[in-house]
Image (cartoon, helix red, strand yellow):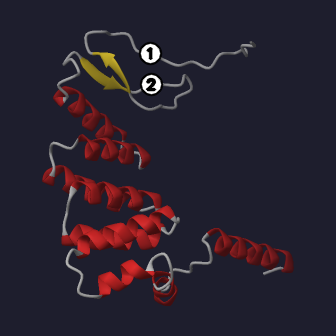
Amino acid sequence: MSKSKRSCFYILLCLSVIACGGHGGNAKDEDAILKRPPYIALTDSINGDAGDKAALYFRRGDLLSRNNLHELASSDYKQAWELHPDETTGLRYASTLSIIGRPNDAIRLLQDCRKKFPGNTGFSNMLGDLYMQVGETKQALQLYNDLLLSDSTSKPSHSLTLVSDGIGNLQMPIAKKASSFSIRVNMPLPWKCSR
């Protein structure tokens, strides 16, 4: 490796460590973080004879997440979910999995949450967004259509379609009347509008 490439590598490595807050992800670092304020009180309660450990894991996960320690937060949300799977924990856990770049794990979790809590459309909405994120547009559209059809506030004459940007790229779905045969296409204008 040439000297300039090696220098670039070390600079990028240092920037990565700084961007991650110096958190290397090993067990000693994680343990050290959890044993200092503001996490120590919750950690001691979790390790002690506390009654509702699921709530403590959730609170500590929330605190970790607010301090951008999402990897650690996901571990706590997972513990809380395994001890007491509820809607709020499921949403936070799935959201955190998405933040740390694990959308497929978040999708599996949300599919499970939809079965456990069929009345909560928040899981379906987030699942549709994750489907779009991983490129599963057909599954996202089907899910959004199912949401529209099951929603008592929407009329059954509405469905979803993709909007083309005029150059072959598909954008997020929009609602349109199923009885209408026109397709809305967003075309880039060849001129700029000035105000």
Where residue 2 appears, x then y in whole percent?
Answer: 83, 79
Give the quarter of the figure containing the C terminus: top right
**Residue at the extreme bottom of the image, as rendered:** 28
- Mark 1 falls on what kind of element? loop
Where residue 106 appears, x then y in whole percent?
Answer: 33, 58
Give neighbour class at mark 2: few <14, some 14-19, many 20+ (Cα, 10 Å).
some
* Residue underneath mark 1: 184
Q: What residue type is labelled 1?
A: Arg
Residue at image coords 19%, 49%: 114
Q: Residue 163 carries which label?
A: 2
Which numbered disc, 2 or 1, marks the residue that appears first in the sequence? 2
Q: Do the residues labelled 2 and 1 touch (CB within 8 Å)?
A: yes
Residue 99, relative to residue 142: is it above or below? Answer: below
- Mark 2 falls on what kind of element? loop
Residue in the foreground of this view, choosing between 63 and 103: 63
Q: Quadrant of residue 83?
A: bottom left
Give me the C-alpha separation between circle 2 and circle 1: 6 Å
Residue 24, relative to residue 109: is it above or below? Answer: below
Residue at image coords 35%, 72%: 76
Drawn side of residue 90 relative to residue 59, left or right: left
Residue 148, relative to residue 136: is it above or below? Answer: above
Where residue 168 appears, x then y in whole percent?
Answer: 52, 29
Q: Quadrant of residue 56?
A: bottom left
Q: What residue type is labelled 2?
A: Val
Residue in the foreground of this view, choosing between 127 and 162: 127
